[in-house]
Image: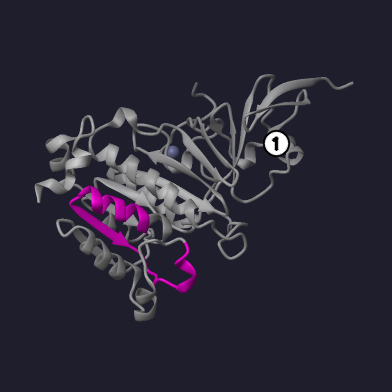
Amino acid sequence: MGERYAVQQRLAGWGRSGQARLATATAVVVGVGALGGAAAGLLARAGVGRLRLVDPDRPALDNLHRQVLYTEADVDAGRSKVEAARRHLSSVNRQVTVEAIQDELDQSNAAGLLAGADVVIDGLDHPRPRYHLNRACLAQGVDWVHAGVMGTGGQLAVIRPGKGPCFECWAPPYPPAEPKRSSATHGIFGPLPSCLASLQAAEALKLLLGADQDVLAGMLLVELWPLGLRTVEIGPPAVRRCPACGAGGAQDP
Amino acid sequence: MSRNIKIIVNGFDEQVPAGSTLAQLVELFEEQHPELVAELNGRFVHPDDYAATVVAEGARVEFINAAFGG
Ligand SMILES: [Zn+2]
């Protein structure tokens, strides 16, 4: 069994000790659709010891063009996403413990869902629960990897409580308006969420391996059509303080 | 007589009237949308502060059309 991670263990700074570190880690994946499903798949393959999957939905036929974890059989069986994901991930790597929680993260349950998390993957499909996730991660001091997608583009940011700007340092003010763009109006390019999910998994693995200095700073803007990548700086808010973490304000440099 | 200043918007050099506010730039660059994240010199500006925020020569402005799907 020791051989399954041989190739990734050859990477600088990984080795057996890094692999052992992953084996005792817990990653919580909130929203197991196109982003969360693909990220969970990579984390399971990498040997993250415990994955807690949180999602209220069932896979639908119009998910399959982008949600790489699910099959037609899952749709036909009417399984929940978390249960279908648990089956697939367990068949990918039996050393990984997968918890399937069919629920929607909100203000009331966020703290419990994140209990024991070493890192959180944001696979949510609506702005609102991301504010609740942000508050819960701030309260518990848990790093989370945000991504969002729509159409042919999206963004990635790593949010580290106490070490940099939080989600509400830069997100539109709460409560968020209903997004103008949705999968129903603007569609989602199939390769896009898997691309962002790979980046989320990469950042999460770096965090779990303690490679803090190599984690994304700022926000990565990803556009696939035509292809363009850009990183923008994210500092504390310029004028008024962040309502969640208190950073920024006009007085701060 | 209005003078123009040079600023950077979404990574590109632009010329805008001196004294422009962020609110005026949002209109000029047609960036009105609920998912707008507006940043001035790497720092987020709350929508309620757009009208009072004057953009200076050399400023870096980012209008990010944030995506919240998954
Ligand atoms: Zn904040």
What chain letter is assigned to the residue under label 1? Answer: B
Residue type, mark 1 in image: Ala
Question: Is A49 in the magenta?
Answer: yes
Bin the neighbour count of mark 1 within 10 Å (Cα to Cα): few under 14, some 14-19, many 20 and up.
some
For residue B69, above or below residue A228: below
Question: Does ligand 1 reach within 8 Å of label 1's beta carbon?
Answer: no
In screen coordinates, is A197 left or right of B40? left
Location of mark 1 (residue)? B51
Q: How many marks?
A: 1
The residue positioned 10% from the left and 47% from the top of the image is A2
Q: Position of residue A74 (x, y in %)?
A: 35, 74
**Corner quadrant of residue A36:** bottom left
The residue furthest right is B1
Q: Which residues are magenta?
A: A37-65
The residue positioned 43% from the left and 35% from the top of the image is A165
Q: Position of residue A181 (x, y in %)?
A: 60, 57
Q: Position of residue B69 (x, y in %)?
A: 50, 56
Mark 1, secondary structure of its residue: loop
In screen coordinates, is A247 left or right of B9? left
Q: How is the image coloured?
A: one colour
Viewer-proximal residue among A88 and A22: A88
The residue positioned 68% from the left and 32% from the top of the image is B52
Residue A138 appears in the figure: no
